[in-house]
Image (tube, rainbow, N blue to C red):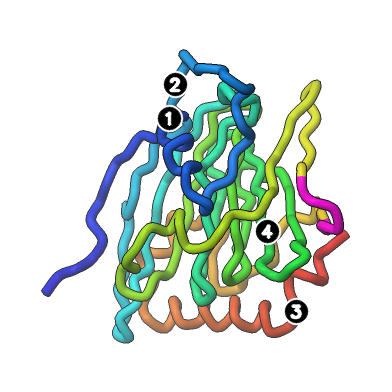
Amino acid sequence: MNNQPEKLVISVHFSDLLEKARGSGVHIAPLCDGEQFTDNPVLYRADRNVQVQRTGIGEFWHADHVHYSAGSMPNGEPIRSIGHWNRADQAEIFQVTSGRVVMVVVLPESPHTVFMATYHPGEWCVMPFGVYHITYSPWVESSVFNISCESAPAAGDKYARRPAPDVLLTMKAGTISVEAPPHTTVSTAPLSPALHSVPAGLEAFLPGADEAALRDLQTELAKLTAAGWPVGAVE
């Protein structure tokens, strides 16, 4: 039986983000009291499962290519992804292919540690296991390629795994900052460790990767976590 994830192309609008934010798993800046938005911009277009590799132990590695608009949404936040928690065993790496994005990554431990950094073409952001993350595109239209490992397509809505942290990116007069509760540690260190098992171009990795190469990447990510990364990257 072939139950590999199917290729999808989806467009996400501001209204879709508002709908997701009705649940506790997605946090956004509110519209002003009584305000009705008339502009419903496309936040991004996602090409899902553009590459898929299945391992002999029932895992799926798959790749997405997401193309973001730029600027601000009707609630004043920069253009963004919906944001969600990764699973505790989920490996995921993002690499910017064009433009410039801000990745906001929240570690699961409380009080939270938040990593907020800007990434340019060719730079990657490696997700620690079990984190919450949002991609923002404040300045220019941007594209981000990512690969992720799932244990055979997970059931349920990834946007409802657990309540979202009260963390947002704000931009005033062109300057970005993180809005977060007291006692939150905020670091501007990029989550870009050297990965010996991945070439510089993430798009080229998955099509040619055999099971040993995928296992090497999983092992390298697990060793990073066991060594205390990314807490040591906090500035």
Q: Position of residue 160 (x, y in %)?
A: 45, 57
Q: Is residue 101 magenta?
A: no
3 vs 1, front mark: 1
> What is the three-letter code of the residue carrying label 1?
Ser
Residue at 65% in and 48% down: 103
Question: Would you place residue 139 above or below residue 199 in this image?
Answer: above
Span colored in magenta: 180-185
Question: Viewed as shown, does residue 113 lie left or right of 44?
Answer: right
Residue that label 3 marks: 228
> First in sequence: mark 1 or mark 2?
1
Cα gap from disc 4 to disc 3, whole angstroms: 15 Å
Residue that label 1 marks: 15
Question: Viewed as shown, does residue 156 lie left or right of 35?
Answer: left
Residue that label 4 marks: 106
> What is the three-letter code of the residue carrying label 3?
Gly
Cα gap from disc 1 to disc 4, whole angstroms: 24 Å
Cβ–Cβ under 8 Å for marks 3 and 1:
no
> First in sequence: mark 1 or mark 4?
1
Instruction: Assess disc 1: are there few (<14), some (14-19) or many (≥20) residues with their C-alpha within 10 Å of its C-alpha.
Output: some
Residue at 81% in and 57% down: 184
> What is the three-letter code of the residue carrying label 4?
Val
Question: Viewed as shown, does residue 191 lie left or right of 33?
Answer: right
